[in-house]
């Protein structure tokens, strides 16, 4: 059997990482962080367990990257939905509604995410987190900020605080109240974005998040296998802990 080409190996790595991100979002959303193991995630993704450590140092980094992917793709989808607009106030409203919508639609996942951010590692610097930062920075710039380096961290802090307030067990704040506070701070009309009572927000959240994770068809490429003795430097590391 001839060896796989570099391009095929690269595509295999990309798809494998995407499947792990998707599986992490699904499982943590279903069972919570503590009840989900790296082995569970690898099994759901259809990947060898030894591959997880090739992409992520540990479970917390994997889950945080997965949630940041969900956040940035949800935000991206909201900003670019029809009718598309360059109006800075409308885009700010859509951004606020997208993040608050995740707190409403994915409370278990987002609560676990917020708890993870308070751990010693804090933000995981990964492509997903950087893309989320870029989108929020572009949003505050189109809104008309004269000082994006200062105004972006404040927007991020306000959104994080709103999500935390909406998800505190026992004393959650209603999302419409949090939305009102954010909209008043940025001088936005209530009708902008996707108001909580609008038809666009009606019904149960879409359980299928696959559109946010470019896993493609698993059958078109061969699976990646754990490394064998004497394998090349491009092969994968040994199996990590299942905890």
Image: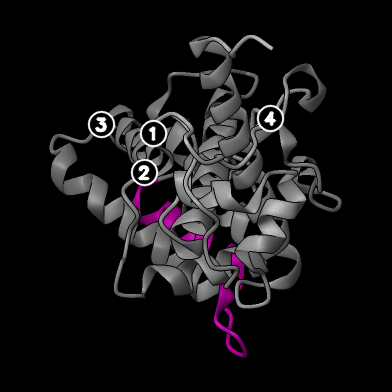
Say which label, 3 or 2, has the lower sequence index: 2
How far apart are labels 4 and 1 at the CA level? 23 Å
Residue occupied by mark 2: 126
Say which label, 1 or 3, has the lower sequence index: 1
- Judge whether residue 131 is colored magenta: no
Is residue 128 toward the left or the right of residue 133 in the image? right
Disc 1 vs disc 3: Cβ atoms closer than 8 Å? no
How far apart are labels 1 and 3 at the CA level? 15 Å
Disc 4 vs disc 1: which is toward the camera?
4
Is residue 143 toward the left or the right of residue 209 in the image? left
Would you call the spot at circle 1 few (<14 residues within 10 Å), some (14-19), or many (20 or more)? some
Residue occupied by mark 4: 215
Who's the residue at 46% across and 32% down the image? 91
69 or 229, nearer to the observer = 229
Secondary structure type for disc 3: loop
Disc 1 vs disc 3: which is toward the camera?
1
Is residue 95 toward the left or the right of residue 143 in the image? right
Image position, residue 19 (x, y; %): 66, 40
Q: Give the range drawn in magenta.
A: 167-187
- Judge whether residue 186 is colored magenta: yes
239 or 162, nearer to the observer = 239
Disc 4 vs disc 2: Cβ atoms closer than 8 Å? no
The quarter of the image holding the C terminus is bottom right
Disc 4 vs disc 1: Cβ atoms closer than 8 Å? no
């Amino acid at each position: 059997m001839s060896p796989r080409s570099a391009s095929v190996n690269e595509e295999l790595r990309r798809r494998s990482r995407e499947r792990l991100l998707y599986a992490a979002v699904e499982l943590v959303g279903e069972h919570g962080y503590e009840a989900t193991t790296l082995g569970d995630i690898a099994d759901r993704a259809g990947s060898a367990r030894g591959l997880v450590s090739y992409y992520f140092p540990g479970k917390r980094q994997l889950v945080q990257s997965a949630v940041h992917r969900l956040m940035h793709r949800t935000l991206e989808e909201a900003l670019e939905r029809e009718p598309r607009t360059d109006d800075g106030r409308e885009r700010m409203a859509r951004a606020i509604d997208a993040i608050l919508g995740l707190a409403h639609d994915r409370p278990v996942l987002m609560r676990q995410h917020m708890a993870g951010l308070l751990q010693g590692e804090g933000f995981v610097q990964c492509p997903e987190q950087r893309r989320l930062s870029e989108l929020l920075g572009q949003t505050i710039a189109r809104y008309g900020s004269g000082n994006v380096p200062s105004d972006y961290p404040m927007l991020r802090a306000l959104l994080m605080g709103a999500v935390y307030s909406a998800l505190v067990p026992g004393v959650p704040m209603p999302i419409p109240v949090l939305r009102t506070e954010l909209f008043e701070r940025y001088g936005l009309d209530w009708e902008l974005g996707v108001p909580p009572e609008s038809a666009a927000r009606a019904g149960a959240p879409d359980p299928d998040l696959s559109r946010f994770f470019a896993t493609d068809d698993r059958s078109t490429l061969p699976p990646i296998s754990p490394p064998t003795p004497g394998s090349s430097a491009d092969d994968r590391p040994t199996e990590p802990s299942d905890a």
